[in-house]
């Protein structure tokens, strides 16, 4: 069987608290799935300024990464290694993901409000440039993998891609999928496609239609929070040619949700689904 997710999780870190949380969640997932964690620090102008201020060189970065990787191996019982190199987070994270054949990226972000708004916009650029799914996490800790995943359905575009990704993620984490849809005849048809596939492949799921509202994002977050969901799964919208991806305000508000529920962001790719096992 060819799997959608390769067995390496890449975690960029700037050694902040929120990145430490991303590392912790990635390590829990890696232990559950039998994956390896690779830490990444991109040496940019911020790093160089810090090193100059502290009177250190790049060996300081190497030692910090080495210590974190060693702690993960000892405390979590997983394989961990690290990479550090000069570059830009917008390019280097994707480049390293391709080089090491990563299957997932865990990205810590400080959110989109107040002084950290710039950090949030950085996170969005990393998400839309990623060759693999990105799980965006904030400061709130989550442990034990993902058991309840919310799949919002807002359009009739790409039902097969949504369906097969959701099926794969559900099986990887042994999770229940909660379909949450906006009202509408076309959406009902899309959801039928999804649930029929889930039924055939023994995917546990629930399905609920949201009430009429001008703020579906708020409804999704409230629904996910009320159901103690530990992951929200969204797909970005592809620009023409599937080479670049866009995130609307709806996606951004979900990614930086105030309940701090992790969000898996998937960029559609031109892939041969026939290579993936049919269940």
Image (cartoon, grey):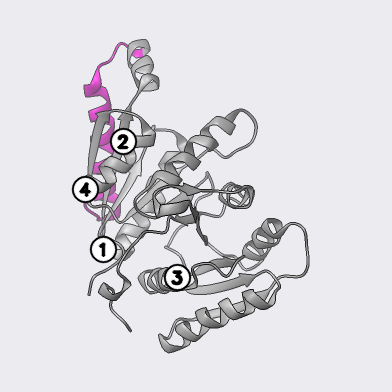
In the drawing, what numbered circle is on residue 34?
Answer: 1
Q: Position of residue 116 (x, y in %)?
A: 57, 31
Residue 80 percent location from the top left of the image: 23, 48
The outermost residue toward the front is: 240
Dot 1: few (<14), some (14–19), or many (≥20) neighbours within 10 Å?
Answer: some
Q: Residues within 10 Å of mark 2 (few under 14, many from 20)?
A: many
In the displayed structure, 218 sits above or below 91; it is below
Quarter of image, res 229: bottom right
Query: Label 3: which residue?
Result: 166
Q: Which badge, 1 or 4, is on the more N-terminal residue?
A: 1
SS type, badge 1: loop
The residue carrying mark 2 is 92
Q: Earlier in the sequence, mark 3 or mark 2?
A: 2
Q: Which residue is mark 4?
A: 100
Label 4 secondary element: helix
Let me know if residue 1 appears in the view: yes
Q: Nearer the viewer, mark 1 or mark 4?
A: 4
Q: CA distance from mark 4 to mark 3?
A: 24 Å
Does label 4 or label 3 sit earlier along the sequence?
Answer: 4
Considering only order in the chain, which callout, 1 or 2, is on the residue closer to the N terminus?
1
SS at mark 3? helix
In magenta, the rendered stretch is 54-79
């Amino acid at each position: 069987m060819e799997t959608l997710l390769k067995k390496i999780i890449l975690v960029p870190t700037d050694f902040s608290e929120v990145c430490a949380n991303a590392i912790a969640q990635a390590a829990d997932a890696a232990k559950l799935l039998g994956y390896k964690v690779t830490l990444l620090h991109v040496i940019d102008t911020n790093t160089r300024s810090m090193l100059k201020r502290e009177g250190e060189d790049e060996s300081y970065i190497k030692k910090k990464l080495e210590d974190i990787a060693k702690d993960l191996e000892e405390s979590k019982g997983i394989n961990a290694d690290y990479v550090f190199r000069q570059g830009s987070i917008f390019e280097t994270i994707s480049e390293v993901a391709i080089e090491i054949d990563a299957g997932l990226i865990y990205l810590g972000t400080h959110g989109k409000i107040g002084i950290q708004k710039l950090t949030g916009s950085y996170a969005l650029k990393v998400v839309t440039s990623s060759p693999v799914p990105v799980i965006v996490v904030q400061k709130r800790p989550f442990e034990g993998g993902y058991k309840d995943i919310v799949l919002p359905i807002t359009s009739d575009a790409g039902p097969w891609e949504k369906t097969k990704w959701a099926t794969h993620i559900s099986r990887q984490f042994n999770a229940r999928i909660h379909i949450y849809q906006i009202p509408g005849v076309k959406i009902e048809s899309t959801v039928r496609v999804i649930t029929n596939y889930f039924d055939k492949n023994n995917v546990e799921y629930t399905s609920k239609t949201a009430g009429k509202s001008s703020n579906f994002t708020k409804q999704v977050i409230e629904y996910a929070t009320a159901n103690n969901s530990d992951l929200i799964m969204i797909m970005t919208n592809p620009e023409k040619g599937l080479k670049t991806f866009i995130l609307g305000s709806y996606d951004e508000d979900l990614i930086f949700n105030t309940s701090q529920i992790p969000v898996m962001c998937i960029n559609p790719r031109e892939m041969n689904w026939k290579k993936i096992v049919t269940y």
